[in-house]
């Protein structure tokens, strides 16, 4: 056998092995981060329910300040859509407010167009806490982001530490949010 034949055989074998591994590997992920903000729940919730405010704290949105934005509907209400198109790392897509439970939770659907197509679900939930620093109630903000990758694209989850990467991005965004609201 020639070296080219051996190399080709190894490459095909590796591809088959990856496809088989994809059949048995996970196809979904859920990332959760939280932060305590030393502000009343009402103030915090009334800030995060407006998707346009993500321009100031969301790491992914802040990747490209020059990206094109498009808005449909009334921000802070069910059905509002925040669209983006970036020539930078932020890609293109839109997120839609699917449901708001006033003072408690905002559910969003995130639809990516580039660099890859996909759908993710996200929610931000607020809850009161009492801290030593603030005898008045402070607010715990929990941000959850989840998605599924269909076979064979789920193979990417074998090589990407998506939990760590997305977790770090959500934590950065929540830290930015905390800094803004505690000023």
Image (cartoon, rainbow, N blue to C red):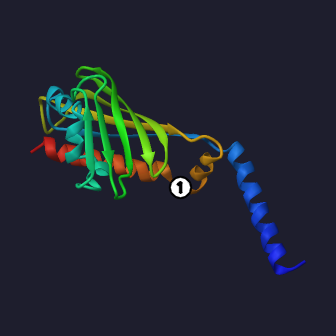
Q: Toward the viewer: 181 or 38?
A: 181
At x 21% / y 43%, what residue is drawn?
177
Q: Toward the viewer: 112 or 22?
A: 112
- Residue 24 placement: quadrant: top right
Element assignment for label 1: loop
At x 23% / y 22%, what residue is drawn?
103
At x 24% / y 27%, what residue is drawn?
73
Residue farthest along the top direction in this orientation: 101
Question: Where does label 1 land, which residue?
Answer: 160
Quadrant (top left, top right, bottom left, bottom right) of the N terminus: bottom right
Q: Is residue 68 above or below residue 44?
A: below
Q: Is residue 9 visible?
A: yes
**Left-right relation of 159 to 65:** right
Q: Residues within 10 Å of mark 1 (few under 14, many from 20)?
A: few
At x 65% / y 46%, what residue is drawn?
152
Q: Is residue 172 visible?
A: no
Q: Toward the viewer: 167 or 88?
A: 88
At which x and y percent is residue 70? 26, 40
**Left-right relation of 120 to 128:** right
* Image mark count: 1
Q: Is residue 29 above or below residue 81?
A: below
Residue farthest along the bottom direction in this orientation: 3
At which x and y percent is residue 20? 75, 49
């Amino acid at each position: 056998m020639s070296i080219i034949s051996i190399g080709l055989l190894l490459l095909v074998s590796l591809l088959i092995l990856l496809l088989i591994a994809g059949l048995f590997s996970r196809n979904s992920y859920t990332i959760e981060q939280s932060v305590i903000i030393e502000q009343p729940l009402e103030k915090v919730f009334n800030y995060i329910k407006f998707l346009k405010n993500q321009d100031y704290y969301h790491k992914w949105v802040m990747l490209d300040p020059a990206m094109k934005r498009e808005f449909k509907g009334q921000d802070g209400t069910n059905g509002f859509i925040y669209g983006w198109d970036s020539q930078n790392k932020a890609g293109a897509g839109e997120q839609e407010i699917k449901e708001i439970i006033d003072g408690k939770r905002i559910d969003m659907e995130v639809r990516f167009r580039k660099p890859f197509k996909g759908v993710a679900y996200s929610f931000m939930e607020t809850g009161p806490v009492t801290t030593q620093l603030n005898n008045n109630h402070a607010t715990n903000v929990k941000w959850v982001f989840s998605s599924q990758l269909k076979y064979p694209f789920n193979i990417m989850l074998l090589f990407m530490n998506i939990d760590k990467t997305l977790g770090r991005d959500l934590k950065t965004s929540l830290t930015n949010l905390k800094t803004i609201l505690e000023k």
